[in-house]
Image: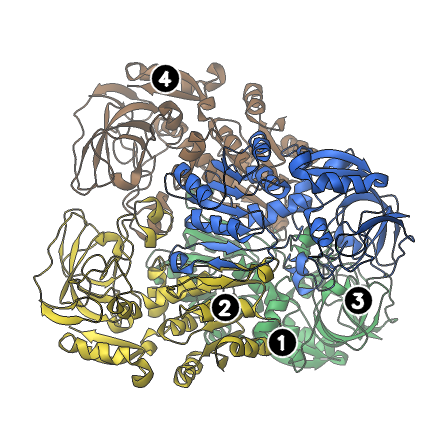
Chain colours: A blue, B brown, C green, D yellow
Amino acid sequence: MKALVYRGPGKKSLEDRPMPQIAGPTDAIVQIVKTTICGTDLHILKGDVPTCMPGRILGHEGVGVVDKVGAGVTAFHPGDRVLVSCISACGRCEYCRRGMYSHCTTGGWILGNAIDGTQAEYVRIPHADTSLYPIPPGADEEALVMLSDILPTGFECGVLNGRVQPGATVAIVGAGPIGLAVLLTAQFYAPAEIIMIDLDANRLEVAKRFGATQTVQAAGDKAAEAVMQITGKRGVDTAIEAVGVPASFITCEDIIAPGGTIANIGVHGVKVDLHLEKLWSQNITITTRLVDTVTTPMLVKTVQSRRIDPKLLITHHFTLDHILDAYDTFGQAAKTRALKVIIGA
Amino acid sequence: MKALVYRGPGKKSLEDRPMPQIAGPTDAIVQIVKTTICGTDLHILKGDVPTCMPGRILGHEGVGVVDKVGAGVTAFHPGDRVLVSCISACGRCEYCRRGMYSHCTTGGWILGNAIDGTQAEYVRIPHADTSLYPIPPGADEEALVMLSDILPTGFECGVLNGRVQPGATVAIVGAGPIGLAVLLTAQFYAPAEIIMIDLDANRLEVAKRFGATQTVQAAGDKAAEAVMQITGKRGVDTAIEAVGVPASFITCEDIIAPGGTIANIGVHGVKVDLHLEKLWSQNITITTRLVDTVTTPMLVKTVQSRRIDPKLLITHHFTLDHILDAYDTFGQAAKTRALKVIIGA
Amino acid sequence: MKALVYRGPGKKSLEDRPMPQIAGPTDAIVQIVKTTICGTDLHILKGDVPTCMPGRILGHEGVGVVDKVGAGVTAFHPGDRVLVSCISACGRCEYCRRGMYSHCTTGGWILGNAIDGTQAEYVRIPHADTSLYPIPPGADEEALVMLSDILPTGFECGVLNGRVQPGATVAIVGAGPIGLAVLLTAQFYAPAEIIMIDLDANRLEVAKRFGATQTVQAAGDKAAEAVMQITGKRGVDTAIEAVGVPASFITCEDIIAPGGTIANIGVHGVKVDLHLEKLWSQNITITTRLVDTVTTPMLVKTVQSRRIDPKLLITHHFTLDHILDAYDTFGQAAKTRALKVIIGA
Amino acid sequence: MKALVYRGPGKKSLEDRPMPQIAGPTDAIVQIVKTTICGTDLHILKGDVPTCMPGRILGHEGVGVVDKVGAGVTAFHPGDRVLVSCISACGRCEYCRRGMYSHCTTGGWILGNAIDGTQAEYVRIPHADTSLYPIPPGADEEALVMLSDILPTGFECGVLNGRVQPGATVAIVGAGPIGLAVLLTAQFYAPAEIIMIDLDANRLEVAKRFGATQTVQAAGDKAAEAVMQITGKRGVDTAIEAVGVPASFITCEDIIAPGGTIANIGVHGVKVDLHLEKLWSQNITITTRLVDTVTTPMLVKTVQSRRIDPKLLITHHFTLDHILDAYDTFGQAAKTRALKVIIGA
């Protein structure tokens, strides 16, 4: 079968690979119908993710059709149309029982990382019963690809952890695909203000169309000053970091109101300064989270009831044969204005 | 001054009454600009509210201008435009400290009940600092009259107590003004389905315009059957009782899914049957609540940011001189299609 | 093997039955080391539980040793010492994902009810990975038998649902084994007062030894009056129903303070009167729950760290050969002063 | 009257000062019966608190008797015995309504800081109705002095913010008076393990007597290693920083388990390194808080019901005449083994 394979820092190739096989009783083999590329895949290609070894098939998102199941799989059968979660969860370890699938002792984010992923014709999914989700009849499968990772990430790590509330003021630092996923799902809670912060005018324009009430085209101190001016020097109730660099986290520290919450989503490579000399008395909360995808069933319902339209995030379409072009387009997002690209079978 | 006075069961009159005076250090005198009539006022007129004695000026809703303040009032000054809360709260007793203003030991629902109310040219407001709310510059004062009682009641007793969540299925039993206030504020939380139940076709039509995803024109067993069919026999996550009679509470019991919440808003005159022989194992929650108006500042923000439009509830306008006509119109809602009536100064 | 078999209302016998066999990939066969008898077993014997058919081996509590496992079981192996949960949970259905194991679509309370139970030498446990719990090395296995059902029931349905808090006032109506399990686990949250209500002087004496700060030997109006006097007419923050008859639920309604919570544990056979004409404005919460056993791992930790001593509940010991005597002793608790009886292999 | 006056960095004196006067309608004058010294008072004396100007009477803790009240005070009368909260709260601003008294727009921590404090014969208390608490008849007033600041600080900033739960593992970094107050109040929630970390053997000995299940006499990497060994490399569910220096916060980062909470109490003078490159995916929560004293009424109940004995923290007694000796004793705690000192009238 065809598969996109990581070949070490800076290298990837579309290759012919053997079909995956059932390796344990809880495995399923899924034929991929549509997949996509994540910012994390670009991190892997930079060599930033040591758990991902050369030779690995990339990809942790997608929808497909169940092809085979192991002896212990009871919730799915061959022919079932399924959504693949980026997180594999056994459903039985201490972390899974607490809803922290991200830290499943035999799962977590392993797909397209520690085991072969979804940018291929077929993929093996361990712990299938608790790592796949049924696709409702008549659902738009392309929209659901956004529920493998980016929407639950924005919602769980940003909106839920950030405790977005009706009437509240929210700032989102970073208007890339993740920041925009936060923006879409934050509206589930009717905040009064959603301020979007980025340097890219195009992305801020998109953010306005997606529901941002204010945009700030600036970074660092200037961004913080603009937010403080917008909020009458009060700051925001929720600040969501959706970039992954120290400067944007510092912006969150600078704009958070007393009693507020900073929700970090970004993947950070270095430490940041936490200004406890200022914040110790400010009654703030800071959260970090690797997405657990526990909200996936709920998100499916909101898509089905049209409370949210995830297709807004999709800008380009490719076939698996042209996945290298898809990577080019996604990798040069500033130029191509790509948000999420769909790769069909 | 002119005032609408309760004169015993079935009797009311528009009378000339002396101006209210500051009676304690935390009092304010407010000149009423706009007020409205509540279903509870009709209950008083039926003689159902023993705490309300003949001779009482009715009304517990309104916006106005501060005329005078007592020596202990620090948050408001003469000339300030204010929203009057239906609940008076001292802000210092055990209940107020817990946010249960409804049970304030020297307040609670006393306005237009145990003390003279707002259907007059002027009203005395005790505990003014914690029972009035500033009106933001440029706000639509008519819309804010809906925040004295009906919107916080729908939101606190129905939506918050009912734990409405994104993706959830909600049923509202009763499409009168309170049920419609629930409907408007439930949408703060993006439920997947909102099923509105009533016998009045006009009110269900209004409900559809206000955002109901389904309507059921039935009562009793037939209503319950219709809801079970809509939900694939699963029932609803939240059932909100907005009528105040045993039959509608029973409907809630009949349609609640395992793990769901029944939030009672209705003012009940008799006991209801609680079918614990069926419900003991269903992991359900039942809540009751007299509105606390603790969410009033938040609701003001959602109005200011246009997340909600309370004016949708206003159907008729009168002046205080014609308040008896206003009562007639409001009292014959089935015929006049009245929801909320505004009474201007 | 030997097993205690239900033979229709009023009838039970100790019989020789075939060994249970692995029937599905997620099954385990467990050799029972210790089991016990539950009040629910007595209900079955009265014919009150229609899902339990004659011929059924009773019992849903116990500790044992894993004998065999199905192909899909990964968390346990033959020889592992395990605690059997009274609730079987697949870990993957909608209810299990929400922690509502009691409503697992292919599990719930089936053991000793819809399938053969633990009052036998061996038992088949479906969904073994998520329905068994490992016994820590060195643990007191007899104490852990109390964690199959009675302690999680008291804790989840009573203490957690009742939102017991530090400094709060709690009343427990019914000082039987379940009420006493509530009493023990309520002390995890340092309430200021725990008032125990029962007619049996011996059980109230036990309650005092277990940590009750007050006891009331009365029922009905007299019990309610006593509680109102103890609390200075304020009522209690949490009232826990641990009997299962209308009168004791009414007592809870009569003593609940504004803002308080009534947590029902009792198995009710008939409806009760809910006095909404009084309670609609009291901001109360009523909960029902069939135990989910989601807190079992936590309870094991509190036992291991000696925060609680479940052996306090054990009054008598028998062997499986003498289980009929055990039933006699447990069934005549008022006379024998039995709380929980242990039945060894 | 006699008063302890701050005279600039390093300088303090016991002076004769004029009696405080009612300055606003919500003021009360309280005659101090007992007060104490806080670590924060030592910070002021080092010149670390710029809001506290020379000439200020220090002290923000104490019990006393109401002497006079302003026209707007309704909850207290001359002769009432009261507990003084370290936090002054108006009860009406946005922050007070949210229970964030620490950020009251006209209060917060002002006593013995921006206005004269309690280390004197009399003190003026603004917002008296919401900043004083009645002392129950028969209460041990010396014990209640611990409820002015140290116990609510340990409980709110450490235990509540740290979400201590039954069965959980808690580490407290710093066994000074604040750390010990955390230790006492953490036991309200029955954690399985409480690990106390400090370099001072005497304080760890005290911690064991107060209920610590483990002690670690180490700092930095060695402390973290010891905790990881105790917890089987898992880390702790809650890590509480009770020192206020970067090293102890880093210890918390090093020992926190996935899904855990770091609750900062310490007053920090410089920034700390937040290792997001490690923590971004660990689903942790970090909180900061200046005590709000919203739990004071609840803590009074736990003292009255003997769930906690705050007198354990009191090691020395002085009279106001000898307050300079009290400062010496408290300032040399390592030598004198002082925890909290009581200064009687």
Q: Secondary structure at mark 2?
A: helix
Q: Earlier in the sequence, mark 2 or mark 1?
A: 1
Residue A317 image point, x, y percent:
77, 34
Do we see residue C167 in this rendering? no
Distance from Cα at disc 3 to Cα at disc 2: 37 Å
Q: Are marks 4 and 2 in contact (CB under 8 Å)?
A: no
Task: Give the residue type at disc 3.
Answer: Thr
| Spot occupied by residue B134 in the image (x, y as percentages of width and height) | 31, 34
The residue that disc 2 covers is D250
Q: Secondary structure at mark 3?
A: loop
The residue that label 1 is drawn on is: D232
Task: State the separation of the CA atoms marked 4 and 2.
Answer: 67 Å
Task: For the C terminus of chain B, give its image quadrant.
Answer: top left
Q: Nearer the viewer, mark 4 or mark 1?
A: 1
* Residues marked 3 and 2 touching at CB (< 8 Å): no
Q: Is residue C295 left or right of residue C253?
A: right
- Residue C74's tag is 3
User: Up-down: is A256 above or below D229?
Assistant: above
Chain identifier of the residue bearing label 2 in the image: D
Kindly report which numbered mark, 4 or 2, lies closer to the viewer in this rendering: 2
- Dot 3 falls on which chain? C
Q: Specify the amino acid type for callout 1.
A: Gly
Between disc 3 and disc 2, the foreground one is: 2
